[in-house]
Image (cartoon, grey):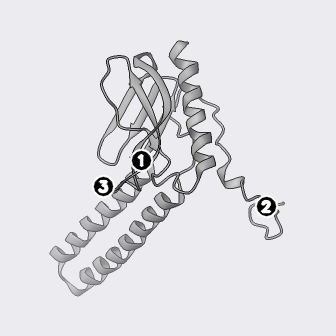
Amino acid sequence: MPLPFLTADRAFDADAEDIALPFDDHDSWRRPYRPGPWRVAAAAGLLLLASFVLLAAMIITLAGSLSGASACFVLAAAMIAAALRLLRVGAWVSLHGVRRVGFFRTTTVPWASTEAVRTVQQPVKWLGFPRTVQGQALVVVRRNGEPLPPLVTDHNADFLARAEAFERATDTIEAWGDEYRTG
């Protein structure tokens, strides 16, 4: 039984990791791009730190201090939840609309409520820090004029130093908007 994903002689394509994901079911919420290396590295770092905190909780439990162990378990659970939430952050699309998932807040805009989905040149946050740089952002223009923070930017944790992936993801989200906003 061949297992090509386990073989060392498999020919790797440098652009294979940036291939857009297929969409079979348009009713379910999908992210039209892969999480970026900065986002995955931050989540992996949090999970690694949580494993050390869990190890400390086990040692504290064996030493007999249940209150300290429970505090460590709660801290580890919060770190694991933060890592999982960090991986969910981004733009999600479906037949029903576009969803901007932030770390603390999620906003869903139905396609019928959108005027346009377009890429604009504007100051954007660098990796989510307060520092802004000139870049591109995918924005949703609502019919009622209420502003929505950018869905994705070319300097966020998913697309920093991945310009082609940013172009492909924004084109895909704009295509979803064009298809479902009118239909």
Which mark is in front, 1 or 3?
Answer: 3
The secondary structure type at the circle numbered 2 is: loop
Quarter holding residue 3? bottom right
Q: Residue at x 64, y 32 (%)?
A: 24
Quarter holding residue 101? top left
The crowd level at tag 3 (other Cα within 10 Å; few <14, some 14-19, many 20+) is few
Q: Which residue is mark 2?
A: 3
Q: Is residue 146 left or right of 118 when viewed as pictured?
A: left
- The amino acid marked with disc number 3 is Pro
Q: Which residue is mark 3?
A: 130
- The amino acid marked with disc number 1 is Val
Q: Is residue 58 left or right of 7 when viewed as pictured?
A: left
Q: Residue at x 56, y 57 (%)?
A: 161
Who comes first in sequence, dot 1 or dot 3?
A: 1
Most distant residue in the left direction? 67
- The amino acid marked with disc number 2 is Leu
On the image, the x and y values in percent for residue 72 come to: 25, 72
Q: Which residue is mark 1?
A: 89
Which mark is in front, 1 or 2?
Answer: 1
Gap in angstroms between the C-alphas marked 3 and 2: 45 Å
The crowd level at tag 2 (other Cα within 10 Å; few <14, some 14-19, many 20+) is few
